Amino acid sequence: MNSSNSAAKLEKKYVEKNRRNNMKILFNNLYSLLPPHPSQLQEAMALPDQIDAAITYIKSMEIKLEKSKMQLENLRTRPNLLSPQIEIQEMSPTMDLILITGLDNLAMFYNIIRLLHEEGFEVMDSSFSLHGNSKMQVFHETKVIGNSTMVYRRVKELLNGSSSSDDIIEDLLRSWDNEIHSEMIGLINLM
């Protein structure tokens, strides 16, 4: 019984020694994952200090991760702050409208064609192409009946939103009355 008791004590001693060695290895592995600091050497730091440094680093990384997530969410939800570039080249009797915008709204292409049709312009050819994070739309018109400054103002309102709620309601009512004719759709060249 005495020999079995001492064997059990020796076994507990070896188990405890192995457990402590495994914990030291795990602590060293944890500390090795931290970025190196010139003022802190692993050999110079006691084990509790190494654990505190790891905890501090993990907490700082959690805060940094949360800030990055919030910044990403802000970037995803905010509207494109870059204002679109609008250029009108009027060469009698034709006019070209060049518009460079972000990729956020491809339906804007059709809305501008509708707007030009409302202003009395006949769209002979139009296209858009994607370049990186921007979209370039080119409209070639003939038969200039409308006013190019009025078109510029209306396109700008369409891109940036109307100035008042009455304008929005009026535009909605006008868009319901406007019919896109099949020959106009046939003239649209998308690529």
Image (spheres, rainbow, N blue to C red):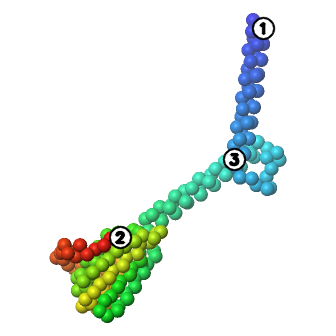
State the quadrant of the N terminus: top right
Q: Secondary structure at mark 1?
A: helix
Q: Do tag 1 and tag 2 residues touch (Cβ < 8 Å)?
A: no
Residue 3 numbered tag: 1
Instruction: Determine the residue positioned at 31% across, 94% down.
Output: 92
Alpha carbon distance from label 3 to label 2? 52 Å
Mark 3 crowdedness (10 Å alpha carbons): few <14, some 14-19, many ≥20: few
Location of mark 3 (residue):
33
Instruction: Determine the residue positioned at 52% across, 63% down.
Output: 71
- Which of discs 3 and 2 lies nearer the camera? The answer is 2
Identify the amino acid type marked 3: Leu
Give the image location of residue 38, x and y in percent: 79, 56
Against 96, is 32 above or below? above
Residue 122 numbered tag: none
State the quadrant of the C terminus: bottom left
Alpha carbon distance from label 1 to label 3? 45 Å
The residue positioned farthest toward the bottom in the image shown: 92
